[in-house]
Each structure stands twice: as C-alpha cells, then as structure tokens.
Amino acid sequence: SWVNFSRYFHKIIDRFELTKQENVQFVRKIPDEAIFIEIDEDKITQVLDNITSNALKYSPQGGKITFRVKELSNHIEVSVSDEGVGIPKADLSKIFERFYRVDKARSRKLGGTGLGLAIAKEVVVAHGGEIWAESRENKGTTIFFTLPLDRIQEDEWNDI
Ligand code: ATP
Ligand code: MG
C-alpha cells in the first residue's frame, strides 16, 4: 500500500524510543516533507525492526544511533548507523546469509538466530531494492537499503 515514508519511519523509531535504555541516543535525519512510496508495510516494518534491534544490541553504553532517509532521483535510501563493535571486512557480505553470525561466542551471549538480515535482504530485494553494510571495527556500522520510487506512475498521473 502507499505510505508517507517519513511519517511511517518516525512511528517505528518512536516505538523503539519508548523502550530503549536512556543512555542510548537516537538522532533522526528524515525529511520533513512527505515521501510517498508503495511498500508492504508489515514486511518493511520487519526489516526496520531487525536493523534497529541489531543497532541497539551491538551498541555500547551511551552510543548514538542515527536514522536517515535520503530522497534520490529514482529511489529512497534508508540507513541506520550505530557506534558499536562493528563488523570485520571479511564478514560484511556474509551477514546477509542465513544463520551467519560474526562472533559465535558474542552473538550467542546476545541472543538471536542469525536470520534477521537474511529476511531483510529477501524483503528488500522483493521490493526491487538493494541492501548493504558499511562498517569499521570498534567505530560502528551502517546498514543501508533502497526502495524504488515509482516516478513512472507519477508521470502517468501528470499526463491524465
Ligand atoms: P536475529 O536477527 O535472527 O535475532 P542476529 O541479530 O544475530 O539474530 P542478523 O540480524 O541476521 O542476526 O545479523 C547477523 C550478524 O551480523 C549478527 O549476528 C552480528 O554478528 C552481525 N551484525 C548485524 N548487525 C550488526 C551491527 N549493527 N553491529 C555489529 N554487528 C552486527
Ligand atoms: Mg538481528
């Protein structure tokens, strides 16, 4: 269905803001104007829930988590950045594989199955988008994904 992505993203972040630890700081860099986009809301919510809970799970005390939306010509780029442990370069592409977890001992302690990002990738690709990670060990991680903007349809509307 069609949603105003800015408003929809704020609502998801609000839900996490209610339950997060006080020492974790949320920063939102989300455009004020409406960005209309056609998505499966439940599925994209699952994607954002996993990425956000990962950011919280791997953040240090007092860490900052930054939520961004950029509107580009044919798609939007959504990202969530943390200041956590980071991911070694060699593992960066593998974290989207089923059951892949970087540090077995650490991950076991923190809980989870290693499915979250594999599911996120499936959902984003099904929407015609891409998902990737950038990270520096002990500096932090950013997970990015894109969702196509249906400009063609907008143009068709303008022609009517
Ligand atoms: P699940 O999401 O199924 O509860 P999970 O969080 O371990 O379990 P994924 O979300 O798929 O699984 O993430 C895979 C692995 O990627 C994690 O186990 C962790 O090692 C690494 N990872 C993911 N996000 C981050 C992050 N923000 N910072 C550091 N490592 C991360
Ligand atoms: Mg996860």
Image (cartoon, rainbow, N blue to C red):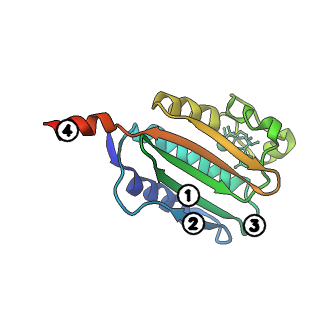
- Quick one: label 3 or label 2, which is nearer the N terminus? 2
Q: Residue 60 location, x and y as percent?
A: 76, 62
Marks 4/3: CA distance?
49 Å
Residue identified by numbered label 1: 67
Residue at 82%, 56% in the rendered image: 138
Residue 44 position in % (x across, y down): 47, 41
Q: Earlier in the sequence, mark 4 or mark 3?
A: 3
- The picture places residue 72, in percent across and down from the top left corner, at 45, 47
Q: Residue at x 13, y 36 (%)?
A: 160
Q: Assess whether mark 1 and mark 2 are in contact (beta carbons under 8 angstroms).
A: yes
Label 4 lies in ligand 1 vicinity (Cβ under 8 Å): no
Q: Is residue 152 left or right of residue 58?
A: left
Mark 4 or mark 2, earlier in chain: 2
Residue underneath mark 4: 157
The residue type indicated by label 3 comes to Gln
Question: Would you call the spot at circle 3 few (<14 residues within 10 Å), some (14-19), or many (20 or more)?
Answer: some
**Disc 4 packing (10 Å; few <14; some 14–19; many ≥20):** few
Q: Residue at x 51, y 62 (%)?
A: 29
The residue under label 1 is which amino acid type? Answer: Phe
Amino acid type indicated by mark 4: Trp
Q: Which residue is mark 2?
A: 27
Residue 47 lies left or right of residue 58; in this view the side is left
Q: Residue 61 has which mark?
A: 3
Q: CA distance from mark 3 to mark 2?
A: 16 Å
Where disc 2 sits, the SS reads: strand
Q: Residue furthest left?
A: 160
> Please, is residue 35 above or below residue 30 in the view?
above
Q: In the rendered view of the protein, which quadrant contains the N terminus? A: top left
